[in-house]
Image (cartoon, rainbow, N blue to C red):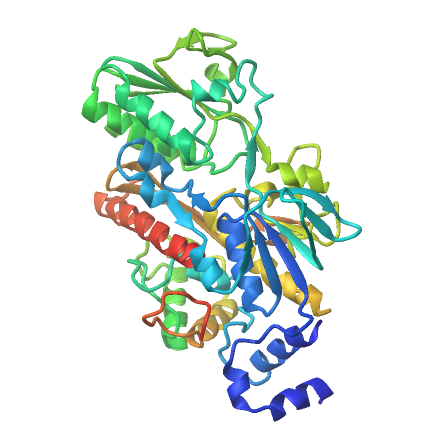
Amino acid sequence: MSPTRRALLATGAAFAWARPAPARAAAKVVVIGGGFGGATAARALHSGGLDVTLVEVNSTYVSCPFSNEVIAGLQPMAAQRFGYEGLARAGIRLVHAAAIGIDADARRVTLSDGTALAYDRLVLSPGIDLRFDAIPGYDAAAAERMPHAWKAGEQTLLLARQLAAMPEGGTVVLAVPGNPYRCPPGPYERASLIAHVLKTTKPRAKLILLDAKDTFSKQRLFQSAWKALYPTQLEYVPLAEGGQVSAVDTDAMIVRTDFSDYKADVACIIPPQRAGRIAAVAGVADRSGWCPIDPMTFESRLVPGIHVIGDAAIAGAMPKSAFSANAQAKVCADAVIDLLAGRAPGTPKLINTCYSLVAPGYGISIAGVYHPAGGVLADVEGAGGISPVDAPMALREQEALYAADWYRTITRQVFG
Amino acid sequence: MRLAVVSAWLLAGPVGLALATERPPPGASSCAGCHVEGAAMGAIDGRPAAEIAAALAEYRSGVRPASVMSRIAKGFSEEESRAIAAYLSRQRPPGPEPSQERP
């Protein structure tokens, strides 16, 4: 028996039941980004006895999951906002500043308030940045006229206001990027719920969905629901039929493709994306703009000592979702704890489940199980898939209920 | 620096106590994404291992109707499912404090 263990056993069972107290010199982990990934990682690392600092520039988090419901007027914006008091109560040190520099050799993060944080390991969960250089005419200023609403907040409210104010008979244009991007089924849920709003409040209006690809997540489920629910409201234009946006003109409110100009009363442009900026600053993003990682530990393939989780990571078959970020954060935290203790991390398995609403009370889902294989996170064969295409309405109602309950439970777990 | 971490592992591992830091077997940490108290999906922490393992086996074989669990359970072998069930059975069952942090 090691001297350590003998000494600990001698201190008695009362100590054994307690959460492990951080030792005087507990290893330091800095987590950058307080979304579903980073906040979960901070909790798990703190539970593991490490000295954790969570760096998040905002004092309130605005959740993207269920923000499509806000756009459609089905959920109040207040239900999207979460403070960090719960994490502070759990004993996690929070720093509300922006990380502006990372010195991977010195293992130090520089913050916008002029201070610096030393780390033994760094976890980045920076989410996404929108690429305002990808579509001619679509920059940050254009997004004030044609919102992306792909980072929840003012953009979400702007799009909701524009839709509510749109005249009957108007046209909504919704543009979807190619892969990869945050929340693969999200644009199609948005299209569905906007079509629902049009059907119920402006039945002569329509939505044109311009897609830069030909196949998408839960496609058969979405398209069969659209046919049944929104035959006149929703027109889908895939890549093969000229769906890729080539430019926008915000003054004329025109969305251009190589084939047609679409005049919009309301235009929502979801542009291509990349990992949040700090990833590039840290040197963990590759030429694709995303971050290659070791699927066992989420440690960067490019810079040792830095782990990347959530939307910013290249997680193989795992989609960029809040559920994925939460699951990855726990696996990453276990690996960080192991690596700091000099142990080899175990081989993980991860799960993702994503619900989408195609109408109130009509939910559909996709699920997957993933494991490291061939250097990436690959699908476990035979598992996962989408809801049955020919299911009774009772299952759709049940999945809508599960969607709402998932949102309630995950946000309570992460921020509560 | 490593003492606290190593001691947490020793206490959770060989002694077999259900500490918050007990290392979950592969896949188990994803379960809490849905299965907590108050959710329609139902809380599973602290439920009997045999019950959880039986449910997973039935989801896997398709005997038990499900929305997503039939799709998820197929990603785990019998042995992996039993390890997950045993781990979850040792977790603190739902209490008045929703936070999972403090025993």
Q: Residue A108, relative to residue B98: is it above or below?
A: above
* Residue A250 found in image quarter: top left
Q: Nearer the viewer, residue A337 or B64?
A: A337
Q: Position of residue A10 (x, y in %)?
A: 62, 93
Q: Residue A191, relative to residue B61: is it above or below?
A: above
* Residue B46 found in image quarter: bottom left
Q: Position of residue A152 (x, y in %)?
A: 43, 36
Q: Position of residue A224 (x, y in %)?
A: 31, 31
Question: What residue is shown at x 41% (from left), y 37% (from top)?
Answer: A218
Which residue is outermost to the right? A105
Question: What residue is shown at x 37% (from left), y 37% (from top)?
Answer: A67
The answer to whether any part of residue B73 appears in the image is no
Q: Position of residue B44 (x, y in %)?
A: 37, 68
Q: Quadrant of the C terminus of chain A?
A: bottom left
Question: What residue is shown at x 48% (from left), y 8% (from top)?
Answer: A259
Q: Is residue B18 left or right of residue A401?
A: right
Q: Is residue A324 left or right of residue A413?
A: right
The answer to whether any part of residue A411 appears in the image is yes
